[in-house]
Every structure is written in structure tokens, then in C-alpha cells.
Image (cartoon, grey):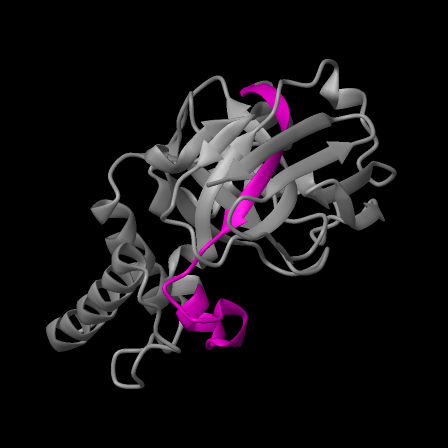
Amino acid sequence: MMTGEREKELMSAAGMLLDARRTNTPIDDLPAAVRPVNEVEAYFVQDRLAIAYGEIGGWKVGAPTPDAPPMFAPMPRAWIAASHGVLGGKHRFRGLEAEIAFLMGKNLPLREKTYSRDEVVAAIASCHPAIEVIESGFTNPTKAEKLSMIADLQMHGAFVYGAAVANWQSIDFSKEHVTLAVDGVVRVERTGSNTSGDLIRLLPWLANEGAARTGGLKAGQWVTTGSWTGLALGTAGSSVNVNFSTAGEVDLRFE
């Protein structure tokens, strides 16, 4: 159980991260006294940031290995855009990850009975190629403490989606090939490289184990399922293209 004093400290951490993001004045890390010491505290800070940014438009979820438990974070609705969009000047770090995302077509409300994989897949409206833009209140989020990074919306900065993929259930994601190019130069080229292994497993996990925080997945929300390309970096004015061999392509440009 978190004490009232500890909640105040974590609220202070959330305030620092919001200020760093909104003013584009990053910090190296959170001060030790207010830094989360476990996932519960990191998620508490995440949720405070999400409240500040308004309606939740979806969730980013991923796992570092096929056997690792997933981690997830909210994606503000205001930060979601369709392909060919131009992202404004709030972006500083401009990290880039190629991802596969799903748009929910049906609600999966909180319930005692566990949702099966088939039930969750049946609730998906469509599958899309996507780019997650990595942003942070930290000078270099890859060098901040892991729990600090998780607290900072798990480095989320924007989500850009491409056109829906026909017959996506037939895609063998273990053989799917992807390229990520910046200004026409391919930075990353990989095959079957989603770190979670079976990326579909992430959705039932989010619908079940994640439900206490999500309040249940909702129709119209996005779920993006982790990086295929690791982290690449763009710059001001960069054009970015992600191309999957079967799942289509998506692009964006930074101001």
C-alpha cells in the first residue's frame, strides 16, 4: 500500500516530467527521492501523465523477449495521426520504431472470466503498419533508469498508422520483413524481428492482466505491439518511411 507521502513524491515526479516535456527542457533523470522504485510506482506516474494529456486513444504494449512479461503504457488520443502526417515542433528526441498495430472494433470490458485469444482476435477491427515516435522528458531516455523511463509514458511521443491490411490473419509475422528509412536511406532492415515473439499474445494479456489499469479495451482504441527495428533517430525536417513486406507501409515527416 502506497502512503500519502509517497503519492506526493510520485506526483512531484509526474510534474517534473510534464514540465520537461511541455517546455522541451529535458532532465537527465528523476531525483532519487521521487524516482519510482517498482513497477507499481512507475505506472502510478504514467497514469498521472496520461490524465494530464487527456483522452487515451490506445495502448503501447511489448516485451523484450518471447518469454518476458509485457509492459504497457497509454497513448494520448491527441498524439495519434494517420500516415503522411506532419509532426509539429514539440518533438525533440525524434526516436523511431516500426510496429504492427491493431484497431479494436468491439469493447472488451472488465470481467472475471479470462478472455481467450480467439475472443480478443474477434474483437479486432483491423491491422495496420505503424510508426511509434519515441519522446521523453529525459535528455537521453535510453540512459535514464529503467523505472524512470517506464514512468515517462514508456518514452511514448506519437503514433502514426498506415492503411488497414487485408486478410491480416494469414500473415506469418515470424517471416514478415520490414525496412525503416529516413530521408530515403534505409536505416534498419529486419525479418521476424518483433522482440515479443508471438506479438498476438500481447493483446489477450492486455485485455486480461492489463485490465485493472486500462478499464477494459474499448472499440476505437489502438494497440501497438512493440518495435521491429529497435530505435532509430530522425531530425527536424526528416521524412520517415516504414515498409512491411505484407503489412503495408506508413510514413511521416517532422517539421
Q: Nearer the viewer, residue 139 or 141?
A: 139
Pinpoint residue 71: horizontal percent, then vertical percent.
52, 56
- In the picture as drawn, the residue positioned furthest to the front comes out as 237
Residue found 42% across the figure and 50% down from its top: 91
Residue found 35% across the figure and 60% down from its top: 43
Pinpoint residue 183: horizontal percent, then vertical percent.
68, 42
Q: Is residue 61 positioned above or below 32 on the image? A: above
Q: Is 165 situated left or right of 218 in this image?
A: right
Residue 126 lies in the magenta stretch:
yes
For the record, the magenta segment spans 123-149
The answer to whether residue 107 is seen in the rendering is: yes
Pinpoint residue 98: horizontal percent, then vertical percent.
66, 43
Q: Nearer the viewer, residue 163 or 204?
A: 163
- In the picture as drawn, the residue positioned furthest to the bottom comes out as 32
Q: Nearer the viewer, residue 180 or 217?
A: 180
Residue found 54% across the figure and 20% down from its top: 123
Q: Is 90 situated left or right of 231 in this image?
A: left
